[in-house]
Amino acid sequence: MFEILVCVLFVWLFFKAIGVALKVSWGLAKVIAVVLFTLALPALIVCLLLAGGFMLLIPVALVAIAWAILKACLL
């Protein structure tokens, strides 16, 4: 009986650990998206003012990636 109780406890603890790991990974994805926004938006403004054209694709891609990560985190 004790062995069954311990097995149930470990299974419950395993699922709790998976839940915590998922919450941490979603939080980390949000932090990465914020860092991408922080780095990409000034680069976007600089490219708009100075270069344009092909150089504009890099910051636009970074903003799009950050937006996609944030959108995925909110679902």
Image (cartoon, helix red, strand yellow):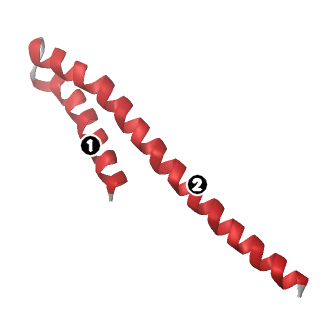
Tag shown at residue 32: none
The quadrant holding residue 19 is bottom right
Give the vertical position of 33 relative to 19 (above or below).
Answer: above
Give the vertical position of 30 relative to 5 (above or below).
Answer: above
Residue under the point 51% across and 53% down: 23
- Crowding at mark 2 (Cα within 10 Å: few <14, some 14-19, many 20+): few
Q: Residue furthest bottom?
A: 1
Residue type, label 1: Trp
The quadrant holding residue 67 is top left
Horizontal side, residue 60 vs residue 53: left or right: right
Q: Residue furthest right?
A: 2
Where is residue 3 shown, x and y percent of the image? Answer: 88, 82
Residue under the point 10% across and 20% down: 52
Where is residue 25 shown, x and y percent of the image? Answer: 51, 49
Q: Which residue is mark 2?
A: 21
Dot 2 falls on a residue whose secondary structure is helix
Indicate the quadrant containing the N terminus: top left, top right, bottom left or bottom right.
Answer: bottom right
Horizontal side, residue 43 vs residue 20: left or right: left
Residue type, label 2: Ala
Where is residue 61 shown, x and y percent of the image? Answer: 24, 35
Residue under the point 23% across and 28% down: 59
Dot 1 falls on a residue whose secondary structure is helix
Point out the frontmost of discs 1 and 2: 2
Query: What is the tally of numbered marks visible in this picture?
Result: 2
Q: Which residue is mark 1?
A: 67
Q: Tell me whether the residue at label 1 lies in contact with that at label 2, contact meaning CB atoms closer than 8 angstroms.
A: no
Instruction: Identify the mark nearer the N-term, 1 or 2.
Output: 2
Give the vertical position of 67 relative to 43 (above or below).
Answer: below
